[in-house]
Amino acid sequence: MLPTDPAPGPAGAGEPTTKHSVLYVGFGHSAARPLDNSQEAQPEAALRQLVDGSSWAVVLRCAEQARAATDWIMRVRHHPASSQAVVLALVEDPGGPLALQALRAGADAVVGLRCMPALLQAQLARLRQRVAHEPAGQLNVAPDTTLDAPTRELRCGDECQALQPQLFRLLWALCERPGRVLSPASLRVALDIPARADAQALHTAVGRLRRLLRQHGLDAHLQTLHGSGYRWTGTPD
C-alpha cells in the first residue's frame, strides 16, 4: 500500500494544495509540456511524488540525455513503492535504439516526441487499467446488501439506489478490499480524481458517500483511520 498524503497546509506553505496525478520530466533541453494536465517536475521531486502516491504516471522526455533518463527509469522500477507507476517515454524514434533502451529500463511504452497529445492521453488511459481496473459484476458489501457494477446501484434488500459515478467507484474500491486500510493516494487513483483537483476533493467525496450510506444505515461500515486512510468493514464496530 502506498503511504498516505501529507495533511494540506495553508496556501504558500509546505505542500501545494493541488495534486497532479501525471508528471512531466524532461531530460535534456526544456520543452513545452505535452499534456495540459501534467505538472513539470525535476527528477528527484518526481520520484518522491511517485513513491508517496500523489502521482501515478510520468511522461518522460529522454531524447538528449538518454543514459540519465534510463537510469532514472530503473530507479523508479527498483523502488517498491513506485514499481507500479506508469512510465511513458518520449523519444525521437519510437523504433530506434533509445526506445529499446527505455523499454529495457522499465518504461511501459514509448512514443515519438512529436506525437499528438490525443495519442499520449490514449496511451495513459490504456495503461491506467493496470493501477485502477474497471469495476465488474457484483459485490456483497454488507448483509443483504450488494453493489452492482453494470447499473451502478446499491441494493439494500428490496431497495435500489443508483449512485453517481464517483461515489460508486469510491464505494467499490473500499468494498472490494474489506478490512484493508486504503490510503488517500490509492483512492484518488481509483476515483480518477482530476489531476488539478483540490487536495480536499477525496475527503469531500468520502463525506458525500457517508451521508448517502447513512440513509441506508450503512455509514458505520465506512471507517476513518486518521493519518492512515479509510476502511470498509463488513461488521462495523
Image (spheres, rainbow, N blue to C red):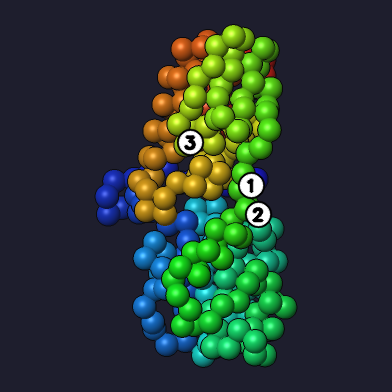
| Element carrying mark 3 | helix
Residue at 62% across / 27% down in the picture?
Answer: 148
Label 2 Cα crowd, 10 Å radius (few <14 / some 14-19 / many 20+): few
Q: Is residue 218 visible?
A: no
The C terminus lies in quadrant: top right
Q: Is residue 97 shown above or below 211?
A: below
Q: Nearer the viewer, residue 47 or 178?
A: 178
Specify the farthest residue to the left. Answer: 11
Write down the residue under mark 3: 165
What residue type is disc 3 on? Pro
Find residue 63 and name its label: none
User: Disc 2, disc 1: CB below 8 Å?
Assistant: yes
* Residue 199 placement (x, y as % from top left): 39, 45
Q: How far apart in space, not on screen, are marks 2 and 1 (Cα)?
A: 6 Å
Residue 16: name its quadrant.
Answer: bottom left
Which of the two discs, 1 and 3, labels the residue nearer the N terminus?
Answer: 1
Find residue 133 and name its label: 1
Task: Please indicate whether residue 107 sits to the left or right of residue 54 in the image.
Answer: right
Residue at 54% across / 88% down in the picture?
Answer: 92
The N terminus lies in quadrant: top right
Task: Please indicate whether residue 200 sits to the left or right of residue 209 in the image.
Answer: left
| Element carrying mark 2 | loop
What residue type is disc 1 on? His
Label 3 Cα crowd, 10 Å radius (few <14 / some 14-19 / many 20+): few
Residue at 47% across / 86% down in the picture?
Answer: 28
Residue 65: name its quadrant.
Answer: bottom right
Write down the residue under mark 2: 130
* Residue 195 placement (x, y as % from top left): 42, 54
User: Disc 1, disc 3: CB below 8 Å?
Assistant: no
Q: Nearer the viewer, residue 161 or 83?
A: 161
